[in-house]
Image (spheres, rainbow, N blue to C red):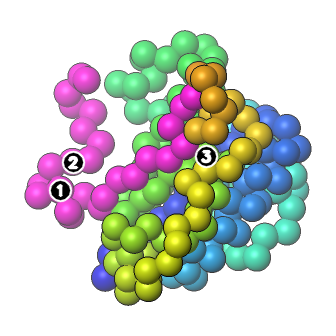
Amino acid sequence: MSRLGVRWTIGDVSGDGFRALRLSIAAARRAFGPQTELAVCVNTVPVEEARERVGKLPCEVSWRAAEREDVPEFLRRRLDGGMAEGVGWKFAPLRIFPALHELSLDNDCIVWEAPRANPRMAGRSAPAPSSPPPTCAPASGSSSPCAGQSRSTPASAACPPPSTLGGRSSSSSKSTP
């Protein structure tokens, strides 16, 4: 059984952004189950302030401060002072759960159920077929896939544990992309 770690990155965003993060965390816990590790990387605001702004959560979450230096150097040298309008913070650090499958979600990404493509990633058997939920619904923020023609950033990214890569490192910083 492969285990899953889900992480979010948040900084100095609106109150709606913190409310969306609270809902995203609760939905991920429901979708992936209690065996899933959850973490939030906080940048540009103190961790305690972020925890307070998120509010009460229905599950345990690991909170950690993210610093610019947490971004791998091979990426950091390509980022401007604004961390590419904040997108660069998603790589601070590159991995939180090196021994697990890792899913990185935006704060406004709500997972309604574990993906059917690989239910074992979350330690579950395949769900019974059902009508799929809508792929997305309007959420705050221009990075939402429902934001229309506006510029957007990926809402999620996934990395397998290194042991599944056949000896190759998932975060090779020796080569320059």
Classify mark 1: helix, strand or loop: loop
Q: Name, please, the residue furthest toward the front.
A: 131
Residue at left 55%, top 80%? 33
Sooner in the amino-acid sequence: mark 1 or mark 3: 3
Q: As shown in the figure, which amino acid type bears the numbered disc 1? A: Leu
Asked whether the beta carbons under mark 2 and mark 3 sit within 8 Å of each other, the answer is no
Q: Which residue is mark 1?
A: 165
**Is 173 within the magenta?**
yes
Q: Which residue is mark 3?
A: 106
Q: Which residue is mark 2?
A: 169
Q: Quadrant of residue 117?
A: bottom left
Q: As shown in the figure, which amino acid type bears the numbered disc 3? A: Asp
Residue at left 21%, top 48%? 169
Give percent across and percent down for residue 153: 54, 31
- The C terminus lies in which quarter of the figure? top left
Q: As shown in the figure, which amino acid type bears the numbered disc 2? A: Ser
User: Magenta segment range?
Assistant: 152-177
Give percent across and percent down for residue 121: 37, 72
Dot in front, 1 or 2: 1
Asked if one can make out residue 9 in the rendered structure from this viewpoint, the answer is yes
Q: CA distance from mark 1 to mark 3?
A: 25 Å
Q: CA distance from mark 1 to mark 2?
A: 7 Å
- The N terminus lies in which quarter of the figure? bottom left
Sooner in the amino-acid sequence: mark 2 or mark 3: 3
Q: CA distance from mark 2 to mark 3?
A: 24 Å
**Is residue 4 left or right of 167 when viewed as pictured?**
right
Classify mark 3: helix, strand or loop: loop
Give percent across and percent down for residue 69: 52, 31
Badge 3: few (under 14), some or many (20 or more) residues near its Cα, within 10 Å? many
Classify mark 2: helix, strand or loop: loop
Give percent across and percent down for residue 106: 61, 46
Badge 2: few (under 14), some or many (20 or more) residues near its Cα, within 10 Å? few
